[in-house]
Image: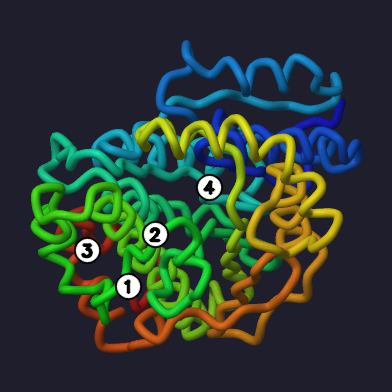
Amino acid sequence: MASSEERKGTIIVTGANGGLGSAIVTKILSERELAATHSGLYTVRKAANASALKTVLNGAPQSHKHEILEMDLGSIASVRDTAAKLNRRVAAGDLPPIRALILNAAYQDSEEIKMSDDGYEMTWQVNYLANQLLVLMLLQSMDATHGRIVVIGSWSHDIDDKRNTNGGEPYKGWDSLYPGAEELAKGGWSKPDSGGGWYTGYRRYGASKLCAVMLMHELAVRLGQDPDLSNIAVFGLDPGAMSSDITRRRGLGMKVIIKGLMPVLAPIMVYANPNGTFRTTRKSAQDVHRLCWEVTPPPKGKLLYANGTDELETSREARDEEKRKDLWKYGLEAIQLKHEGTVLKNWQ
């Protein structure tokens, strides 16, 4: 087994117990040299409930040094505490620098609005705010030469993407998913009682993913301007529609389709159209691996956003600099980041 000094880097995967998360870990383990030379830190909300991840790790090669870490993305304090502990471990040499930070965890609720103990709408906090805090804090522990940040996106972030009409028209009559950070953060937008059934939750999810893509863009720009961090590359991935537990808060009909029919049909669909609407978690995990270790980094200051293996332009709102800056500033206030909390020079 490679010692900590011999290991090339650390891989962090959030939401590692979910469908895509456990598939990403499976892919890492299947790459024997990668698994042997990198430490794996796999985060979950509750380790006791991480049965899918534990099953995968039971088959890990003996050479793969790994840990299951508890981190609640619905808690600012939990994210801050976890990031601080990881920074101390990297600084002490207990862990090698972070080679790949894979921000996979996600939350979706189509039936109701849930507020976090921090006072923010849970979909927005998990899918955007927690990622902003985690990334900014962990930059000091990233491999400044080869580090890569991969964020899982979604076609739902783009109000003009025709895939949003699969099974309905949740954006019909809407021309924006960004009413302002405060409206999204405080759950004042697309409320369940505003009509539209599951459409209301889908819109909130799409808006949170828009915020995540905005974060990717803004982070890429700011890293590109930092002489010490400009070699850290930022990637986004639209993984398509997959069978995963994120649909557990959807209606019965959608659960039957996602959990019952899709596992049977998706492999056939991937064979016919690898980057099509419906994909297997295995295929999307391979796409994550590709972005982490195979794709040439984008030019400094730029984001590379992929739909499977195809490069895809992000939505018009995600490319709106004024909206991005508004969201970034609001997020900083929400997480109460201080100067010593990040090594990014132009973080404000």
Residue sitting at x 42%, y 80%: 160
Residue sitting at x 63%, y 49%: 97
Q: Is residue 41 left or right of residue 345?
A: right
Q: Name the amino acid, label 3.
A: Leu
Q: Earlier in the sequence, mark 2 or mark 3?
A: 2
Tell me: residue 47, above or below residue 344: above
Q: Are marks 1 and 2 in contact (CB under 8 Å)?
A: yes
Q: Name the amino acid, label 2.
A: Leu
Q: Residue 53, percent across and down?
A: 62, 23
* Rendered image: mark on residue 48: none
Residue that badge 3 annotates: 332
Q: Is residue 304 left or right of residue 158?
A: right
Q: Nearer the viewer, mark 2 or mark 4?
A: 4
In terms of secondary structure, where does tag 2 sit?
A: helix
In terms of secondary structure, where does tag 3 sit?
A: helix
Residue sitting at x 66%, y 43%: 10
Residue that badge 4 annotates: 104
Residue sitting at x 11%, y 64%: 182
Quote the CA–CA distance across marks 4 and 3: 21 Å
Q: Is residue 136 left or right of residue 43?
A: left
Q: Residue furthest right?
A: 33
Residue that badge 2 annotates: 136
Image quadrant containing the C terminus: bottom left
Q: Are marks 4 and 3 in contact (CB under 8 Å)?
A: no
Q: Are marks 1 and 4 in contact (CB under 8 Å)?
A: no
Quote the CA–CA distance across marks 2 and 4: 16 Å
Crowding around mark 1 (Cα neighbors within 10 Å: few <14, some 14 to 19, many 20+) is some
Q: Name the amino acid, label 1.
A: Trp
Q: Is residue 227 left or right of residue 329?
A: right
Residue that badge 1 annotates: 347
